[in-house]
Image (cartoon, rainbow, N blue to C red):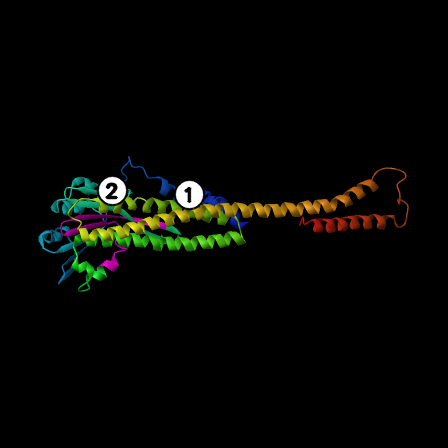
Amino acid sequence: MAFLLNFLFIIPMRSRKNYLQKILFPFNISRTKEIVKVNPTVVPPREEAKAIHIYVFDYDNDTVEERKLDQITECFPYLKSGKTTWINVDGIRKTDVEALCNYFGIHPLIQEDIQSVGQRPKMEEIEDVLFCICNMLFYNETRFVVEQEQVSVVLGRNFVLSFQEEADKDVFNPIREKLKINGSKLRQSGADYLCYSMLDMVVDNYFLVMEKLGERIESIEDEIQHNADNKALARINLLRKEMIVLKRSIAPVREVINGFIRTDSDLIEERTLKYFKDVYDHIIQANDLSENYRDITMNLQDLYLNNVNLRMNEVMKVMAVVTCLMAPATVIGGIFGMNFEKIPWLHNDLGFWLAVGTMLFIPMVMLIIFRKRGWF
């Protein structure tokens, strides 16, 4: 009673509405809005990063310099260092992006794409630089959702510029470790191989995310087999939404990698093309796997509906059997309840017991017949 009073008079109206919505409709509606709100004709606002983190690797076969910079202007001398330079910027701020890109001769259209939000993965070649956008994917095991972060990569002559939104989400740490190893393939190769390595890490991470989703699919499938309730349906619905995010992020990357393979730019050496072709094979496999997961998710919904229908049929079967078994007793009771003066066994001392016995005997015979026919 106290809980009801608190719910009606103390909890605000909006909170009561949200609480009831979670109980009655356990579907993540806000997640749906996040997925379908993409509109390419409207430029969504981007919040300026409060702080940026700048990391620089300047290397060749013999030496490597790793630095963390505080100001974007400290990156300018590396344009003419004579080595291969990787500048990674975590945090997007308009002034910093424009300052760095203008100094390195990056076209304004590329600068605009770097600062955009929710871009479709793509690859472009503008003014002797190759530019691509793709999404790094991460699986949040707390919310059971696929999170994505946009990464922009600019390949120029002897340099690679990469821009990320957040510093705590990154898949490039294995590349950083390889750059510190003397004689590694990265150290012996140019900027095009570094660009390939970054795309390869992004694509390989897709498989890790899909592995987590595969475990989630197995868990939901087992749950449906044992208890097909509304919560299971809500989890299937959430999983289908994550499959949309997965497909939207993975499918266009095939065109991105294909763009690097087919380009005539001299920024990609002939010996590096075979590595991009290897990434192309991986992204095709990832795309096929995401399609398989999508089909499995659709099958989960069919499995849920089949189990619900099967359970409903079992309930209806039991109710039908009970109704049939009660019918003889109802008929006999109705006959002996009619208002006639002369009814057989009406004044017989054993009449009541004979009627009850008949009521029990007929359902037992019916049970035997139903069992032999395999009706239950």
Disc 2 residue type (three-letter) = Ser
Contact flag, marks 1 and 2 (Cβ < 8 Å): no
Number of disc labels: 2
Which residue is most to the top? 41
- Which residues lie in the magenta part? 146-175
Which residue corresponds to mark 2? 116
Instruction: Confirm whether the magenta stretch covers residue 161.
Output: yes
The x and y percentages for residue 264 are: 18, 44
Q: Residue at x 30, y 52 (%)?
A: 203
Compared across the picture, whether 369 is left or right of 260 comes to: right
Q: Residue at x 25, y 42 (%)?
A: 116
Which residue corresponds to mark 1? 29
Compared across the picture, whether 30 is left or right of 59 comes to: right
For marks 1 and 2, give the CA distance. Answer: 25 Å
Tell me if I can see residue 210 in this picture. Answer: yes
Instruction: Confirm whether the magenta stretch covers residue 107.
Output: no
The x and y percentages for residue 102 are: 13, 44
